[in-house]
Structure formats: C-alpha cells, structure tokens
C-alpha cells in the first residue's frame, strides 16, 4: 500500500490523533505547527484526503478531529500491525456529549503539557509512558475492556469493593528511578461530601489500592522496577474548589490523614509547561501547608 503526498509531519499529526483519540485544532498546533495558518492548511489537506474528520459539539467553541478508517489504516501500515490490532473502532457518528468531551480535552491538555515539559528538561527526567482512560485491553474472547479500570477494597471495611477508572496513569523516570502517578481531572461536577460518590469515593479507592499493592503491576507496562507507592494528581477548576476538596478529604477517618499527603491537587490555570514541575501542588490534607513539586 502506498500513501502519496503524505509528509513526515502529516504522518505525525495522524499518529497523534490516533494516540490521543480526539484532538482540538489548538492541541494539534501545540504538538506540530508553528502557526494557525500552517496548521489550518495542512489539516484541510488531511481532511480532503480522507485521513481525519473534523466535528463540532454544541457549546464547545472549537473544532475537534478524529481518525477515519483511512487514517486508521495508515496508522496500522506505519506501525506494521493490522488495523484490528490498533483496538480502534470507527465512530458510527460524531460524539455529542459536552461534559464527556470537555473532560477528554482537559485530560489531553494535561498530557500534552506534561510531554512538552519533559521534553524541555535537561536533567534526564523523562515521561516513560502514559496510559489514558480510553486505552483498551483485548481478551481471548475478543471483548475489549478499559485497561486501567480496577477494583480495590475499602481499608476500613474489606468486604466493600470500590470500582474506579482513573483518567490516566503515567510514569516519570530519571536514571534507574521511576515514579508512578494517577491523574484525575475534576471539572467541578463531582460531589465532595458523599463518601460513596465523586471525589471521596475516588480517594477511598486509591487508599485501598495502595494497601493491596495491585498498582505494582504497572511496572511491567512502563518497564520499571516494581513500584512501592504512587501519587494521585487532581487537577480542578479553581483554588476555591481545591480548598473545598481538601476540607472534604480531611473529613475521612483520622487514620488516613497522613496518607492524604500522597494526593496532590492544583488548578487548570496553574499548569503550564514551565510550571508543572514547580511547587504548585497541595496535598488533600487540609492541615498540610506544604506546597509540593513533581520530579
């Protein structure tokens, strides 16, 4: 199979859309283009040639892009696998859910910012892998399920199972050392005061997850030594929301308050490629005044 008139940058764009599932025009520009004019010209070409499809969602003021079947075939050809091996499914129709897509875009914003920040480092710190929530695992039966969805037992009641799918999991490494992180994007819609829903349920899941040690299996995914612990990063909408989240977290039993230091939060506005590794992170323990930094 031959793909004519596809430049290396065109191919990189198509691969990025595959890797991120959906990208905005601005995200594609951040990853690959020096200006909006150049971006629009090349995207139009990829659309006209049938590799990408643009779509819009009500109340989201920008276009998004996804792969077409032809684009997925090109990705498979490039990676030397079958299209089926990509675990990619063609969309019967464009996504329409505003809340889902805003959440998805925010997760990709974090991923792109983290990637750029790591690329700018000169001290050997690297992003060794990033697994998004939508990444699938194919079973022998042919069924595809979410790879990072898991179950943990409540640390105060081992009979209670808590199921949760993080927004992503990633690994930072330097030399022979690696650190595991889970990412949670909070758009301000999750409840804060109910232990069985929203933010407190998520925190209870990770507390149980840390205790049972299941997370150590990610060492194989990231080709790292077995992880002994992890951090949970929570990115939310405002400093007020973050403070309310910290206060709600500290309403959990006192015996977990020290463990809340492994849960770090910040706001969307505070995260940039130049700031993400600086002290902008606060623990979910509202009594902890320290400001933390990644790396």
Image (cartoon, grey):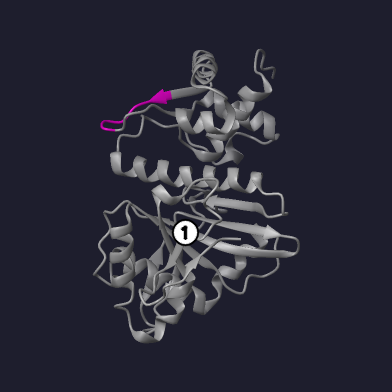
Residue 258 is situated, as x and y percent measured from the top left of the image, at 44, 81
192, above or below 143, in the image: below
Q: Residue at x 64, y 24 (%)?
A: 9
According to the picture, the residue beneath numbered tag 1 turns out to be: 280
Q: Compared with residue 227, is residue 252 higher up or lower down, i.e. above or below? A: below
292 is higher (above) or lower (below) than 77: below
Instruction: Reply yes or no: does residue 289 show up in magenta.
Output: no
Position of the N terminus by quadrant: top right
**Residue 223 location (% of width, % of height):** 70, 59
**Residue 225: quarter of image:** bottom right
Total number of numbered labels? Answer: 1
Foreground residue among 53 and 175: 175
Name the one closer to the observer, 99 or 289. Answer: 289
What residue is at 67 percent from the left and 19 percent from the top?
7
Of residues 88 and 15, which is closer to you in this image?
15
Q: Where is residue 19, by image quadrant?
A: top right
The kind of secondary structure element at disc 1 is loop
Tell me residue 215's x, y (percent): 56, 68
Judge left or right: residue 50 versus residue 224.
left
Residue 237: x, y in percent? Answer: 33, 52
Residue at 64% of width from left, 52% of height from top?
Answer: 127
Specify the principal SS of the magenta part.
Answer: loop
Location of the C terminus (image quadrant):
bottom right
Q: What stretch is highlighted in magenta?
A: 54-59
Residue farthest to the right, as pictured: 175
Mark 1 surroundings within 10 Å by alpha-carbon count, few (fewer than 14), some (14 through 19), many (20 or more): some
Left or right: 69 as drawn, with respect to 85: left
Residue 277 in the image: above or below residue 1: below
Q: Quadrant of residue 62?
A: top left
């Amino acid at each position: 199979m031959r793909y004519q008139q596809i430049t290396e940058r065109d191919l990189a764009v198509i691969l990025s859309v595959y890797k991120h599932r959906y990208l905005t025009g601005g995200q594609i520009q951040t990853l690959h283009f020096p200006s909006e004019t150049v971006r629009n010209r090349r995207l139009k070409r990829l659309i006209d040639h049938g590799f990408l499809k643009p779509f819009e969602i009500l109340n989201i003021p920008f276009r998004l892009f996804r792969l077409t079947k032809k684009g997925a075939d090109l990705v498979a050809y490039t990676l030397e696998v079958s299209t089926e091996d990509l675990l990619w499914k063609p969309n019967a129709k464009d996504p329409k859910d505003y809340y889902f897509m805003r959440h998805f875009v925010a997760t990709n914003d974090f991923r792109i910012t983290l990637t750029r920040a790591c690329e700018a480092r000169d001290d050997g710190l690297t992003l060794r892998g990033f697994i998004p929530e939508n990444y699938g695992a194919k079973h022998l039966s042919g069924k595809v399920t979410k790879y990072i969805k898991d179950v943990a037992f409540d640390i105060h009641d081992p009979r209670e199972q808590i199921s949760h799918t993080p927004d992503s999991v990633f690994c930072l490494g330097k030399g022979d050392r690696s650190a595991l992180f889970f990412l949670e994007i909070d758009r301000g819609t999750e409840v804060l005061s109910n232990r069985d829903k929203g933010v407190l349920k998520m925190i209870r899941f990770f507390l149980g997850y840390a205790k049972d040690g299941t997370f150590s299996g990610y060492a194989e995914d990231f080709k790292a030594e077995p992880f002994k612990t992890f951090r949970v990063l929570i990115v939310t909408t405002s400093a007020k929301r973050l403070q309310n989240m910290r206060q709600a977290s500290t309403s959990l039993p006192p015996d977990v308050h020290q463990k809340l230091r492994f849960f770090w939060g910040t706001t969307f506005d505070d995260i940039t490629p130049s700031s993400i590794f600086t002290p902008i992170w606060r623990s979910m323990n509202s009594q902890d005044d320290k400001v933390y930094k990644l790396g």
